[in-house]
Amino acid sequence: MPHGLIARARSVWRAVRRRAEFEADMQAEFRFHQESRAADLVRAGLPPAAAARQARLEFGDAETHKDDAREARGLRRFDQLRVSWLDVRLGFRMLRRYPGLAVVGGLAFALAVAAGAAGFEMMTQLAYPTLPLPGGERIVALRAWDAAAGRGERRLAHEFAGWRGALRTVEELGAYRTVGRNLVVPGGEVAAVPVAEISASAFRVAAVPPLVGRALVPADERPDASPVLVIGHDVWRTRFGADPGVVGRTVRLDGAPHTVVGVMPEGFAFPLSHAWWAPLRLSASGYAPGDGPTLELFGRLAPGATLGAARAELAALGRRAAAEHPDARAHVRPEVVPFAESIYTKPLGLAIRAELAAANVPAVLFLVLVCGNVAMLTFARAATREGELVVRTVLGASRGRIVTQLFAEALVLGGVAAVLGLAAVGAGLRPFLLAAAGPSDRMAFWIDGRLSPPTVLYAAALTVFGAAVAGVVPALKVTRGLTARLRAASAGGGGPRFGGVWTAVIVCQVAVTVGFPVFAWSAWRESTYYRSAAATVPAGEYLTARLAMDRADVSAASGDTAAAGARFRAARAELARRLAAEPAVRRLTHASALPLTSHPWRRVEVAGAAPPATEPAALPRVGEARVADNFFAVFGAPVLAGRGFHAGDLAADARVVVVNRSFVRDVLGGRNPVGRRVRYSAGQEVPGDGPPGGRPPVPRPGPWYEIVGVVPDLGVKADGDPRRAAGMYHPAAPDADELTHLAVHVRGDAAAFAQRLRALAAAADPALRLDAVLPMDEAQVADLRTLGYVVRLLVAAGVLALTLSLAGLYAVASFTVARRTREIGIRVALGADARRLAAAVVRRPLTQVAAGALLGCGVLAVLGHAGSEFLAGLSARDALAVAAYAAVLVATCLLACLVPARRALAVQPTEALRGDG
Amino acid sequence: MTDRSGQAGLLPGTLDLLILKAVSLGRLHGYGVLLRIEQISGGALHIQQGALYPALYRLEHQGLLAAEWGTSEHNRRAKFYRLTAAGRRRFGEETASWRRLAEAMARSLAATPQEV
């Protein structure tokens, strides 16, 4: 009966909310009754004192009636489960009294909550991104998908012009592209900066006013307008010293003067992570479909328009375009997505969200495991407190009351730990994201790693859940049959036992303990590889840079591509000429990829080797680079076999390659490489600019190349993975477009030469941009830093898992001894062998640890067999090392049982019997 | 609806029905309920006085009674109970059900050997 239920709930709620009032009212009501009755009795002739006594007698035991009344109002159950201040204070006292449990359990708890909160925050930010801008949910991105090519179509200049006039559901339509420019602030250094060339409407769409000066206006987009620049808050501080008079100052972008007209407020980085905004100037004469610069389009939904309406309108425009331009637009489907979701190529649907949510499952499992362990420690402690619990039961505490108290104790521990964990995430997640992304590859500004209120709530829920596991489960176990034991108290024995649940917890714990250090070691080995690769060349003596030149003027006709390429080659040659004249420069060389950086990788097959594998993924993959003919000489790499490159290798039909030592070992199995032929296999993408997955695979294998020489490993990182070190070098002519990287071998400090290098480049051509100017040994600093984070995290988790395991095993062994004091005493009295007694104590923990170690090794073996990325490259010797580590682990755990075992052997028969009485 | 009075002669569940009846005749405080039951039963039914309150609280909890503080006939502050709509409905159902039971019992107990 719903009415009755509602009435009951309301009644309980009222009584709970005004508990004191409820009690006072009840007291007043009872008193009124008794006094009225006494007054009636006085009227009937009794003396007042006798009347009052008679009224009290007739009323009965007021306390019993009060209890019954409370129960009638549904308060009794509530009272049992209510966590009182006293429970909380008791919880804090427990933390102080058992500091070991507090520290170990608390740290583990904090780590688990931190992992859960960080995962959840990233999940919500990635799966449900929102723009922190006024009305951000109505800002949309417009883009197009080329169904025939299976990739996004970003040359949308034609569409931009058409949609700007036609769209009714989207207003303030704008476009931007990100270009690299050489920035020169008078009195400052040359720096390559990413500039957003953007429609003025962006600032109306984002609806954020500038802090100083003005934002871009439509007049700035006119070709004859004077060039202007709006800057971000951070760069205003770092590059202009937060100069309030910055408006009107002139800076140079690729040599062209621009006037700063405004500064945006702190945190503003629309559209993605930008800090420099220049007007987007498109050709007045328009573009053909599929022509012009690549553009990203954005706008704001018109008042009253829905996303669905915008989709429908854009789809109609797409169909019309397909009919009008069947050659260029037949398969291009325009789409509208919320702007925050435009970081995903595919629509952010259930599949991606589910995948992101699934990423949180390990964190929750980790929490369960940690809490299971804390539960075990709590249980062992509760079992030693059985006397106290018995006394409380005798004094009338119900089972629910005791369970609540233990839950409150776990909640206090978890609460303290959760605050620590959340603080760590709040302070650490953002720097971690920044470090992981690197300075050149910033995340979209709305993915910022700041803790949001839902995450704090989630962490609170995790804490309550964890406290329930760590407090309620052991409490239920320890209080089960407490009253029955109470009755049979004199019989001794019995009592709570460590059952199957705890065995499972320990086994899992030990398995994890085996696993963590292996992963940590694998990550550490990767970082040592980076270092050892750096050691093959004196990397600190080389200054490296990526050369680039973005076309200055997007409104130029597309026929100018060839001219732009020629300008780039001329600038590169001019820079080389000027560098060669510098006294500090020993030599310089060019390549498509430099040592110690990521090389594009492709799968190869070797002529005359094993028959071509049917599975293309089984073919070896190698990193490739195109290098100038002096490349090996500049890096001081001797030719180990065969020869290096010479001028004749540049002929179109020469087709020769030089391979590195890892190639000989991994691809050829150590056989003599010189004279062998190798080719790229069919069915893979040709590496190039842009993200992988967007280019169609090549249907045929490439031509055969002859291996003419072998060089040492110079730090080829195929696919960014330092363990895949097989490399293959192609010769490139000095004027080849692929030679986009420059390495300068300098006398003295490479880093000190960076500024000179930038100045020379600016002198050679103001538009010649140098990205990532770094001494070669710093090129992988970011990689190393991220890896360092991972290693430290894994080591911390491993140490924690080990500590928890040891604490758990110690607790179990001590518990066993404490429980069996009487039995052991009798056995000692009967002359039992000491060794057998010790074995009886350690047998159980030993079995559990052995089972856990086996499980851990098994899981690692399965992962290794399945080719897990992290464990790739673990050899048989490594497997032996893992097994040895597991054995050491078992031995360490046995040490944890040593103290309890000694205690067991020291048990005196009399003591055992006395303790029992 | 259990009866906790323990009083012989008061069948389980009847205390609640008697309270509903007493309150159905007009707004009453707890002591008034006691007096009214004694009065309408002609003093035949005795109730352990304190046991009245858990029953009153239970009926209030179930939404059958509503309570509010007011002033008694002797000008003292007292808690008064009255029937709610749900209480009135329940009172009707319980009364009918009690009558059916009482008639059935009376008929059963009046049965003679000839009727068997």
Image (spheres, coloured by chain):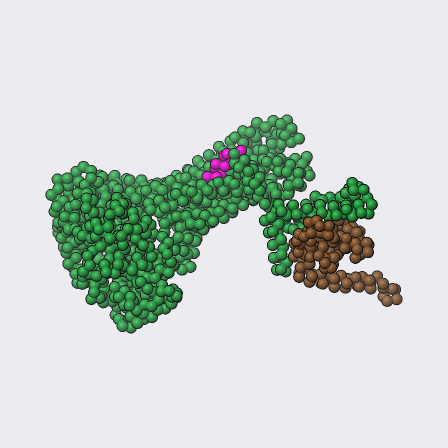
Chain colours: A green, B brown
Say which of A122 and B13 sits in front.
Answer: B13
**Does residue A349 appear in the picture of this structure?**
yes
Q: Residue at x 65, y 35 (%)?
A: A492
* Residue A362 in sight from this viewpoint: no
Whole-percent x, y for residue A578 in the image: 12, 46
- The main secondary structure of the magenta stretch is helix
Q: Residue at x 14, y 56 (%)?
A: A566
The answer to whether residue A292 is above or below residue A415 is below
Quarter of the rendering containing residue A886: top left
Residues in magenta, as a range: A97-111
Image position, residue A327 (x, y; %): 25, 70
> Where does the image place residue A836, in percent across and percent down from the top left?
56, 32
Q: What residue is rendered at 25% in x and 41% in y? A: A777
Q: Is residue A897 shown left or right of residue A651?
A: right
User: Residue A482 vs residue A608: left or right?
Assistant: right
Residue found at x 25% / y 45%: A243
Q: Is residue A102 magenta?
A: yes
